[in-house]
Image (cartoon, rainbow, N blue to C red):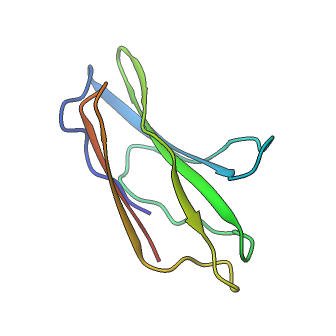
Amino acid sequence: MAWLVPVLPNGILLGYQLHQREAKPGSSERIVYRGIGFSTRVIGLSPYTTYEFRVSANTSVGPGYGPYSRVTTLEDGKCTYEVYIILDKMFGTLYKFWFK
């Protein structure tokens, strides 16, 4: 999974977090990545399960959250190749996700 640098960061960029949850009522969110890089591998996904992911960019003035993107895994717990491009209007941030 990967994302792009914010187009117009709101302050000094300090790092990113990748949030994951199952797409069902009552699911708790967990952070599967924290750091300054632009990509990570998500492992341990269950087969035939729909997940929601979003990236937050942490800056010197606070965090900015992108919207959730949904992905459904296959029988082996992996995803087909999908691309999502999301523009977060509030923070002027462009995120690009891809799953393999």
Q: Quadrant of residue 28?
A: top right
Q: Could you say where residue 12 lies in the image, as x and y percent from the top left? A: 27, 23
In the rendered image, the vertical position of residue 48 relative to residue 19, given as above or below:
below
User: Looking at the image, which residue is at 64% across and 58% down?
Assistant: 51
Q: Could you say where residue 83 lies in the image, as x and y percent from the top left? A: 36, 67
Q: Quadrant of residue 58?
A: top left
Q: Could you say where residue 87 lies in the image, as x and y percent from the top left? A: 28, 42
Residue 40 vs residue 97, the one in the foreground: 97
User: Looking at the image, which residue is at 66% across and 63% down?
Assistant: 50
Which residue ends up furthest to the left in the rendered image? 7
In the rendered image, the vertical position of residue 26 relative to residue 76, given as above or below:
above
Which residue ends up furthest to the front in the rendered image? 25
In the rendered image, the vertical position of residue 96 relative to residue 100, given as above or below:
above
Which residue ends up furthest to the right in the rendered image? 26
Q: Count of labels shown? A: 0
In the rendered image, the vertical position of residue 71 relative to residue 7, given as above or below:
below
Q: Which image quarter holds the N terminus?
A: bottom left
Q: Could you say where residue 96 lies in the image, as x and y percent from the top left? A: 32, 56
Drawn side of residue 71 relative to residue 10, left or right:
right
Drawn side of residue 79 relative to residue 36, left or right:
right
Drawn side of residue 48 relative to residue 34, left or right:
right
User: Looking at the image, which residue is at 41% across and 72% down?
Assistant: 82
Residue 78 vs residue 50, the one in the foreground: 50
Which residue ends up furthest to the bottom in the rendered image? 75
